[in-house]
Amino acid sequence: MSHTLAKRSFWWLTLLMIAVLLATTVSAQAATPAAQALDKGKWAPATYQAVNALIEKNGNQNPAYNAAKKPYAVFDWDNTSIMHDTEEALFVYQINHLAYKMTPEQFGKVIRTNVPEGPFSDSYKNVDGKQVTLDAIASDLVADYTYLYQNYKGFKGTKTLEEVKATEQFADFKTKLFFLYEAINDTHSNSVGYPWVLYLFTNMTIDEVHQLAETSNDVSLGMAIEKVTWTSPKALAGKAGVVTASHTTGLRLTSEVANLMNTLRANGIDVYVVSASLEDVVRVFATLPKYGYNLPTENIIGMRLKTENGLITNVYQPNYPITVGHGKTEVIQSVLAKKYGYGPILIAGDSNGDFEMMTELDSVQLSLVVNRVKGGKIGQQAAKAAEQLGKANPTVVLQGRDENTGMWIPSETTIKLGEKEPKLISK
């Protein structure tokens, strides 16, 4: 071989080795997905920094990341992942559209399901200051429902929805049913109050609930955020007397949470929802692409009712936790920790019902509290987050919002509905 040929062969070999190295580098880069950064949106800066640090520490851009041992995060749904309560919005939608599949006799049994007899707490009196009992208000409601059942064409009658909604029976029905809902929840334990509202789906299929939930979501997303007060008519005072009931209308998407969920997943961190609403109701919101959260159906965990012959019953799923308070911890341990072999790294919530899962799981590195300026147990978490403001490596962080618009604000403070001044914690 001549000197020139040998030299030429050397350069060809060198070029070949460079090409192989380049191809290997490109292949390695393709195998490791590029990091998806969390949008700054309207995050409180310190909270944004803490969440970002969590993703960097646990995500797939960290060399220590193990895809066979994926970390995961757990979010509450109502008032955490969205503004307001999807289950309560659906409850009001059912009332306003008489969306029930029960006879009057069945309705009467359902609204008494597991509710102790006797008067409700002192906060639930009629306008004359007299205590309201379960039997009194249930009797009035059955009378109202019987009239609506016999007259509304969606049941057995001939009148349109608009016609029956103009009646005093409907005004009495809607007010007393919402009054009963709040009285049960504030008087009795979570095991009584939280499943109760779900029993109104009795005799529906899961598909019917899905459709109802989607329609309710879409209607509520278009409604103004405002407080509405109903008063039952004097002409139908009945056994319970005249009562009033108030609720806040309107739902809002929270784009920062949707972006966080998608960013966590893009960084190799699984995302779950554990909610005190019916699992099948939350699934509609959390999984349909049009809402932007894009979670897998199987990653939604919530309350469950027993079905018979494809129809929902007024019986809670036996041997399954009621997913509020310690029940959320139980379901994380029995479902998720059992699947993974360990607990979540992040918990996001807003209420007393989320306190236990924030504090009872040793694996949790960061708790994100959507600040509703509440007292109670979640108030303790908010106060802890306030104490850690400005400190390195916080374990609890706060995120504020403007309840008048339903949007987050770039602060730990929150502006309450009907107010203008932001607040950090409940006094």
Image (spheres, grey):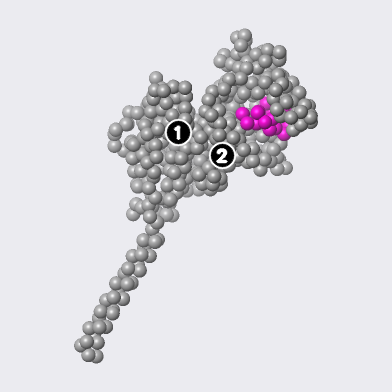
User: Is 326 placed above or below 310 here?
Assistant: above
Which quarter of the figure has residue 51? top left
Mark before the other along the chain sequence, 2 or 1: 2
**Which residues are drawn in magenta?**
92-111
Q: Nearer the viewer, residue 323 or 42?
A: 42
- Outermost residue toward the top in this view: 128
User: Is 203 placed above or below 165 here?
Assistant: below
- Identify residue type, mark 2: Val
- Residue at the location (44% across, 38% down)? 347
Judged left or right of residue 31, residue 140 is right
Q: Position of residue 403 (x, y in %)?
A: 46, 28
Which quarter of the figure has residue 313? top right
The residue labelled by disc 2 is: 282
User: Is 165 placed above or below 124 here?
Assistant: below
Let me know if residue 322 is in the magenta part: no
The residue labelled by disc 1 is: 407
Q: Main secondary structure of the magenta part?
A: helix
Q: Nearer the viewer, residue 345 or 200?
A: 200
Q: Position of residue 112 (x, y in %)?
A: 68, 25
Q: Nearer the viewer, residue 72 or 145?
A: 145
- Residue at the location (71% across, 13% down)? 235
Question: Mark 1 falls on what kind of element?
Answer: strand
Circle number at residue 367: none
Say if residue 67 shows up in the picture. yes
- Identify residue type, mark 1: Met
Which quarter of the figure has residue 344? top left
